[in-house]
Image: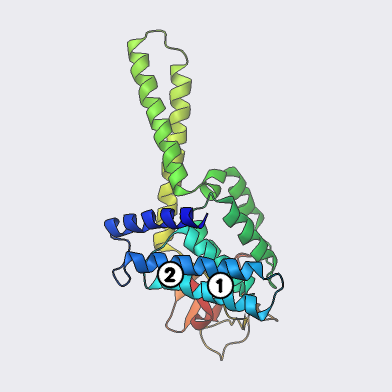
Amino acid sequence: MKTIYSTVFGVYLLFCVLCGDAIAKMATDEIRLAYIQANEAFSTANKISDDSDPAHAFYRQAIVGYEKIIQTGGVHNARLYYNLANSYLLTDDLGRAILNYRRAQRLDSSNPDIHKNLSFARSKRIDQFTVPTQEKILERLFFWHYDFSIKIRFLIGGICLSILCIWLILGAWIVKWPATIPVCSIMMLLLIGMIASVAIEQHTWSTHHSGVIVAEAVIARQGDSDNYPESFSEPLHTGVEFEVIEQRPDWLYIKLSSDQDTWIPACSVELI
């Protein structure tokens, strides 16, 4: 299994180099070696049955390896962020675990393991906010936008376009070709839905920023200074997710999933 993972990852790294995604600060062989060593450290930690210091030491070793590949090697893919998130979760760093699950989810939103582990990590947060009913309804109505990765939406759109073209061509050749208008209408609607979904997501990524609190606790305030009164009676804790409304040098104006807005120190968070 280790050989298979190494081979697959090696192919991916070569692809990244050819496409210009990998920064030349680390050679491909160095990245592959760091990946193998990080996986071995993670596997060794898993074999230690109890939640002990030795296990955490190996998980931290895995974290260092994965972070090196991402930051120095310039390699970014869902598997790396997923492995990194698992390592953080197992060292009780809930904020960075959620942060990296979100990064993995952005690259592969259709992976059920990412969804499952992210949901588990969210359930461990101290702060639990109620998501507005309107947002829940939107997520159910437009499930493909929230649950399908961009690759799958492109694939569905390509299939719909192919069927549409074939059906129109056959309809032009065969006078009594069945259900031309219904089939073409359905394919056209699906195609437009996929294109609109991808366009909206790309626009959101380019214009909106989100993040996660990684500090153990942070006092949210009504302005961008410690002199302002607190927004809530209790501090916000690690793992809280938010959307960025405004950025200033040392403060962020954010909106929580409950639609509440507040200011928090920029040093207490990491952006996705």
Residue 97 in picture, x, y percent from top left: 58, 69
Q: Which mark is residue 34?
A: 2
Amino acid type indicated by mark 2: Ala
Q: Residue at x 48, y 62 (%)?
A: 80
Amino acid type indicated by mark 1: Arg
Secondary element at tag 2: helix
Q: Nearer the viewer, mark 1 or mark 2?
A: 2
- Relative depth, front residue between 208 and 74: 74
Residue 41 in picture, x, y percent from top left: 54, 70
Q: Is residue 180 above or below residue 124?
A: above
Q: Which mark is residue 96?
A: 1
Secondary element at tag 1: helix
Q: Residue at x 33, y 64 (%)?
A: 28
Mark closer to the chain start, 1 or 2: 2
Residue 93 in picture, x, y percent from top left: 61, 75
- CA gap, disc 1 and disc 2: 20 Å
Q: Is residue 173 above or below residue 184?
A: above
- Relative depth, front residue between 238 and 16: 16
Q: Is residue 66 above or below residue 21?
A: below
